[in-house]
Image (spheres, rainbow, N blue to C red):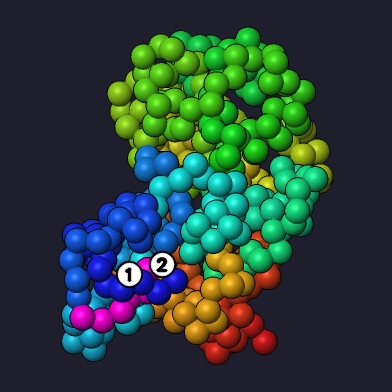
């Protein structure tokens, strides 16, 4: 969307530093510049997960506010006059809904949530399919984390019965995947004391002895979980076995993977399952704009920002940009990938 550059100068600076949290263009009313800018939001999830810091790095790399030095001058290699911001949200389910309604320009989503939303299946069964959703890029693998306090005695998914467990908020992708995992292991939500907390508050509750375990879906290491592991005795619980083998037959968007030893301080690694993280937008977004954004995403200068912005940034590569995509590419993104020889 186009707005007059009554964009708050402070917000532009925050974007450039990849830490923006502006909630709407209407907030930016304090400083008047001479030309127009394009405001482009990227919906994430809670600040303590992987989405927000990675989206902040991407927002910084694709932004090129008025007055910035040119790419050939050692300045921004982003889209001219674009101001992109990472915006925290409730997560994948909230993001696809906000993209469809036009509240968000774009957003991150788990691949399973994106497919369900587009097809009107799974979590979105009985709802109008969100056929306007389009992919800009596949980003990286997101791992199912099941974290428990050592004191809880939990050693398996089945041991969650009778325990206090956070499934995350209902609009999050974590909540949807946690429900599938519990179902696969024959555990009902009524078998445990289920609460709906984001990773930060859930980690605090484990640390304070008020919660036994939490589910989190995201790239490792997640900041909130790293802080939890450094300040409390916790363990990762494996999500593996014949129950997972059966689940993968029914839900092909899951894949087996591993969280290695030592990703979290003093915590042994486990076998688990993963889904893909994708960057989505709407078909209503201008083809030229999305082409320019996709091109900026894969600029060599962006590579440097991704590598230092978050540990998962190194996994965001053109080699995996089209992996696991179950809904159409945006025409602007598709044009770039064809020019880059990634689509024939």
As drawn, 339 above or below 68: below
Q: Residue at x 42, y 19 (%)?
A: 206
Contact (Cβ within 8 Å) of mark 1 with mark 2: yes
Where is residue 56, by image quadrant?
A: bottom left
> For this view, does 126 lie left or right of residue 117?
right
Asked whether 70 falls inside the magenta stretch, the response is no
Q: Position of residue 54 (x, y in %)?
A: 39, 56
| Picture mark count | 2
Taking depth in this image into account, of 200 and 38 the one nearest to the observer is 38
Q: Residue at x 19, y 71 (%)?
A: 32
Magenta part of the chain: 34-40
- Callout 1 secondary element: strand
Estimate the spatial distance between the alpha carbons at disc 1 and disc 2, rounded to whole Å: 6 Å
Residue 27 visible, this orientation: yes
Taking depth in this image into account, of 2 and 96 the one nearest to the observer is 2
Q: Main secondary structure of the magenta part?
A: strand
The disc label shown at residue 40, or none: 2
Q: Position of residue 78 (x, y in %)?
A: 33, 77
Residue bearing mark 1: 83
């Amino acid at each position: 969307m186009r707005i007059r550059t009554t964009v708050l100068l402070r917000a532009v600076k925050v974007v450039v530093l990849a830490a923006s949290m502006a909630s709407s263009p209407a907030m930016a009313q304090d400083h008047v510049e001479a030309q127009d800018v394009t405001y482009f939001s990227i919906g994430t999830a809670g600040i303590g997960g992987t989405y927000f810091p990675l989206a902040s790095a991407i927002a910084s790399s694709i932004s090129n506010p008025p007055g910035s030095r040119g790419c050939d001058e050692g300045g921004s290699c982003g889209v001219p006059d674009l101001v992109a911001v990472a915006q925290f949200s409730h997560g994948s389910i909230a993001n696809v809904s906000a993209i469809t309604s036009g509240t968000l320009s774009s957003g991150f989503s788990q691949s399973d949530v994106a497919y369900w939303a587009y097809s009107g299946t799974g979590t979105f069964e009985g709802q109008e399919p969100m056929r306007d959703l389009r992919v800009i890029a596949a980003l990286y693998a997101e791992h199912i984390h099941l974290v428990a306090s050592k004191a809880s005695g939990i050693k398996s998914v089945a041991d969650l019965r009778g325990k206090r467990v956070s499934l995350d908020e209902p609009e999050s992708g974590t909540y949807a995947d946690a429900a599938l995992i519990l179902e696969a292991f024959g555990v009902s939500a009524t078998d445990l004391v289920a609460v709906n907390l984001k990773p930060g508050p859930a980690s605090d509750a484990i640390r304070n002895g008020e919660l036994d375990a939490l589910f989190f879906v995201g790239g490792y290491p997640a900041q909130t979980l790293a802080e939890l592991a450094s300040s409390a005795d916790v363990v990762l619980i494996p999500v593996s076995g014949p129950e997972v083998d059966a689940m993968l037959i029914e839900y092909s968007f899951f894949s087996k993977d591993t969280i290695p030893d030592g990703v979290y301080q003093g915590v042994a690694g486990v076998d688990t399952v993963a889904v893909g993280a994708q960057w989505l937008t709407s078909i209503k977004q201008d083809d030229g704009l999305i082409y320019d954004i996709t091109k900026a995403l894969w600029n060599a200068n962006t590579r440097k920002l991704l590598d230092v912005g978050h540990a998962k940034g190194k996994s965001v590569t053109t080699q995996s940009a089209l992996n696991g995509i179950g809904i159409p590419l945006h025409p602007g993104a598709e044009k770039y990938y064809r020019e880059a020889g990634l689509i024939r």
